[in-house]
Amino acid sequence: MSILKKIKELKELFDSDYKLLIENQLDVTFIFNKYLGRKGLLNTLYPLLSKSNKEEKSDFGKKINDFKQYISSKLEKDLLINDTNELKSEIDLTLPESYQSHGSVHPITLIVDEIKNIFLKIGFSSIYGPEVDSDYYNFEALNIPKHHPARDMQDTFYINDNILLRTHTSGSQIHFMENNKPPIRILSPGRVYRNEDISVRSYCLFHQIEGLYVDENVSFAELKGTLEYFAKEFFGSDVKTRFRPSYFPFTEPSAEMDVYWGLNSESDYRITKGTGWLEILGCGMVDPEVFKSVKYDTKKISGFAFGLGIERIAMLKYGIDDIRLLYEGDSKFLRQFKK
Ligand code: DAH
C-alpha cells in the first residue's frame, strides 16, 4: 500500500477516535499511545518510507511529519501533551501554581499617586510639563532674568545657550497658563535636574509636584488652608505644620512649609538640623510679573502656587536615610514597597 493511502486511512481512523475522545468514550492516554507511542500506528509508516524511491522520500517524510503534527496539536490543546510529544501524566495537577515574582510600584510613584489623589478630592487635576525646556519657561517667564542671583540656587544642566533640563516644575505653570484661562487648579508632577554633588541628601535628579491655583480674589488664607488640608490627609490629622517666610522670584509673599518630625534619634537631629522641623515645600502668592508673562489681567486675577519635594516626603514617610537608594533599582530595596 502506498504511504499516502495509508496516511489517509490512519487519519480517518484518528478522526473517528478523536470524536470518541471528545464524547468521553475514549481515554487520551490510550489514543496517544495508539498513534504516537513507541509501538504506535505512526511508526508503521516508516518501513514504507524506506522502501520508497529517492525523489518521493522527502515529500513522504514531510507528509508523515505533518500528520504527526496534526495529531499532537489536536491532543495538545486540552489534553496535556507538550511539544516533545510526551504525556505530562506524572504532573500533579492539584499542586499550587509555581511562584512568579512580579515588580512593584516605585516608592516615588506611590507618593506622587497618593498626593495626586488628595488634591483630586478638592478639584485639582494633574497635567504634564516638559523635562527638557527653554530658559524662558524655566527662568525668564518666572521672573528670574539672566544674572538674577536666584539662578545660583539651581545649578543648571544646559543643553545649549537656550535649552536646558528643567531645574524645577514651576515652568509648567507658564506652559499651562499660556494655553488656558482661569479658573485653574492643577498639579504638575515630574522629574527635575540639578547639577549638585551626589550625597545621602542630594542627587542630580529628583522629583517635584507643582501646584497652581488661579482665580479672582484668591487669598493667602486659602493657600494655607489648602496646604494644611494636604498635610493632615497625608501625614495624619495630628501632624504639626508651620509656615516660614521665604523668597522666590515668582511668588510674593513667599513661604516654606515645615512638618514636625521630632527629635527622638540621632538621625532626627541630622535630617532636621537639630530643629525637629523638616521643610517639605515652597509656596506663595503668584507674583504679578508671572501673570504678565502669560498676559493675564493682574488687576482681576490672583493665585497661589506651591512646589513639593517628593524625595523628602518619601524619605520621611518610609524612613529612608539615603536618597541614592531611590535611584539604584536594587530589587531588595524596592521589594519592601510591594503592597
Ligand atoms: N520651584 C521652587 C524650587 O524648586 C519651589 C517652589 C517654591 C515652587 C514656591 C512654587 C512656589 O510654585 O510658589 O525650589
Image (spheres, rainbow, N blue to C red):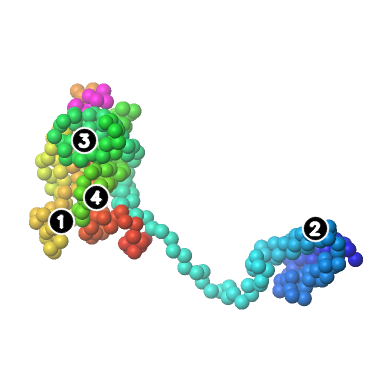
Q: Residues within 10 Å of mark 2 (few under 14, many from 20)?
A: few
Asked if disc 3 is less than 8 Å from ligand 1, the answer is: yes
Which label number is shown at residue 271? 1
Place residue 165 in its image quadrant. top left
Which label number is shown at residue 304? 3
The amino acid on which the numbered mark 1 sits, given as a three-letter code, is Ile
Mark 1 and 2 residues: CB-CB less than 8 Å, in contact? Answer: no
Between the C-alphas of marks 4 and 2, the distance is 67 Å
The residue located at (47%, 65%) in the rendering is: 100
Camera-side mark, 4 or 1: 4
The amino acid on which the numbered mark 2 sits, given as a three-letter code, is Asp
Give the residue number, with chain letter if any, for mark 2.
59
The residue located at (12%, 40%) in the rendering is: 246
Q: What's drawn in magenta, residue-wise?
A: 286-296
Place residue 140 in its image quadrant. top left
Give the residue number, with chain letter if any, for mark 4.
203
Measured from the top left, where is residue 74 in percent x and y? 71, 62
Place residue 217 in its image quadrant. top left
Q: Residues within 10 Å of mark 4 (few under 14, many from 20)?
A: some
Q: Nearer the viewer, residue 90 or 244?
A: 90
